[in-house]
Image (cartoon, rainbow, N blue to C red):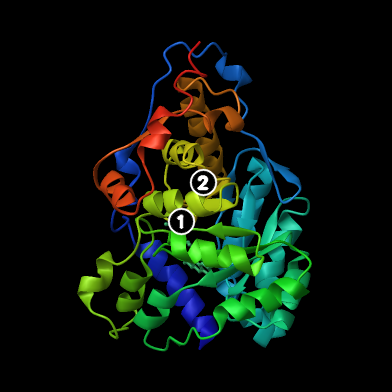
Amino acid sequence: MRSTRKLEHLRLAMKITSDQGDSGFGDISLVPWAMPEIDLAEVDASCHFLGKSLTAPILINAMTGGHLETQEVNSALARAAQEAGLAIAVGSQRAALENKSLRETYVVVRRNNPDGVVLANLNAGCTPDDALRAVEMLNADGIQLYLNPAQELAMAEGDPNFRNVLENLSRVKEVVNVPVIIKEVGFGLSGEIVACLRETGVDFVDVGGRGGTNFIAIERMRGGRRIGEEMLSWGLPTAIALAEAVHFWPGRVIASGGIRTGLDIAKALALGASLTGIARPFLAAYKNGPEAVVKLALGLIENLRAVMFLVGAQDIATLQTRPVVITGYPREWLQERGLNPGKYAQRGYVRNVL
Ligand code: FNR
């Protein structure tokens, strides 16, 4: 049953103590700026997203709702988003569309975060009417529609039929009156897919790359055996997916999948992300109570501000002009794909020198 599956996902994700795979951020370096010419107190990580302001470009990414036991989790995540000034997405609202008694497990997010950025969530094959209802349920500022072919394949009861998704997305976009974000769930959107999605008229992509939560592993823990253990390393590392996506659609890319620290966030923003999404670490924090979720959110913002200071960036726009050096596997990958990783290392070389 869908509701039980949601609870199982939540419980298994809470049990996991480490990420699997490599997000690629270890091969991304920012260049130290030993003469920042700013005071840390002046460093401002705020940004605008979907017409509202955020303290920092951070999204508590889609996870839960759909079972009564998930309501407390969503309640705590939403309070943290509100207190820290971050955006938040709910997990798939399918369960509440099918069973009204579960609406409250999602609506609590809007109630606890009345003025913030709240994103609805459904699968990319949803009908336009379902998308409208999901947005209305939360008075949402936008809707995430997820693409999860690897997860559907790994899931014992999954539905690996992704026919006509592109056409469906165009229809959904015509009907819903809020921005539409297409996201992966941990296996990455490649440049080709981002270029196709751009054509449909949707508003943002969230690359949802490899290196963090691994749904092939989670579905295998639930007994799914349709694909083998060797597929645990499937997916495009987040840093690579991000560079590909930004190449095809600059200014419209959200980075997520294995983003864990203020340093990862700074690197993703410097590579061109407009927002960064983090999911499982907020669940891990929740195990220590709602206050721990707030602490994590505030800590990420402080660590992001510290990195901004160390590259002499007073604001996010300046951070995004700072050089980024891409080495190792991501460099080789991007070179093979004809995307010139060197352009990040040399940008602003003269302009930004004091
Ligand atoms: C998720 N994720 C997810 N994504 C989505 O679009 N709809 C959903 O319903 C869910 N459900 C869900 C449940 C749980 C328990 C987890 C941990 C995650 C995926 C999530 O939004 C994100 O894309 C991945 O978790 C990768 O990010 P992290 O966890 O590596 O930061």
Disc 2 residue type (three-letter) = Ala
- Classed neighbour count for the residue bearing mark 2: other residues with Cα under 10 Å, few (<14), some (14–19), many (≥20): some
Label number found at residue 205 = none
Q: Is residue 270 left or right of residue 178?
A: left
In the rendered image, which residue does mark 1 sit on?
A: 287
Residue 72 at least partly seen: no
Estimate the x, y position of residue 164 in percent, counting from the top left: 56, 84
Estimate the x, y position of residue 222 in percent, counting from the top left: 34, 80
Q: Is residue 217 left or right of residue 110?
A: left
Estimate the x, y position of residue 63 in percent, counting from the top left: 53, 65
Q: In the rendered view, would you say 117 is above or below 269?
A: below
Asked whether mark 2 lies closer than 8 Å to ligand 1, one says no
Q: In the rendered view, would you say 45 is above or below 101?
A: above
In the rendered image, which residue does mark 2 sit on?
A: 292
Q: What residue appears at the point 46 percent right and 73 percent down from the top-left corner? A: 148
Mark 1 or mark 2: which comes first in sequence?
1
Residue in the foreground of this view, choosing between 56 and 172: 172
Disc 1 residue type (three-letter) = Lys
Q: In the rendered view, would you say 251 is above or below 171?
A: above
Q: What residue appears at the point 32 percent right and 83 percent down from the top-left corner? A: 224
Q: Is residue 303 left or right of residue 138?
A: left
Q: Do callouts 1 and 2 mark residues in contact (Cβ within 8 Å)?
A: yes
**Quick one: SS at disc 1?**
loop
What whole-number distance in Å separates the C-alpha atoms at marks 1 and 2? 8 Å
Q: What residue appears at the point 51 percent right and 46 percent down from the top-left corner? A: 292
**Quick one: SS at disc 2?**
helix
User: Extreme front residue here?
Assistant: 338
User: Extreme left residue here?
Assistant: 230
Q: Is residue 331 left or right of residue 92?
A: left
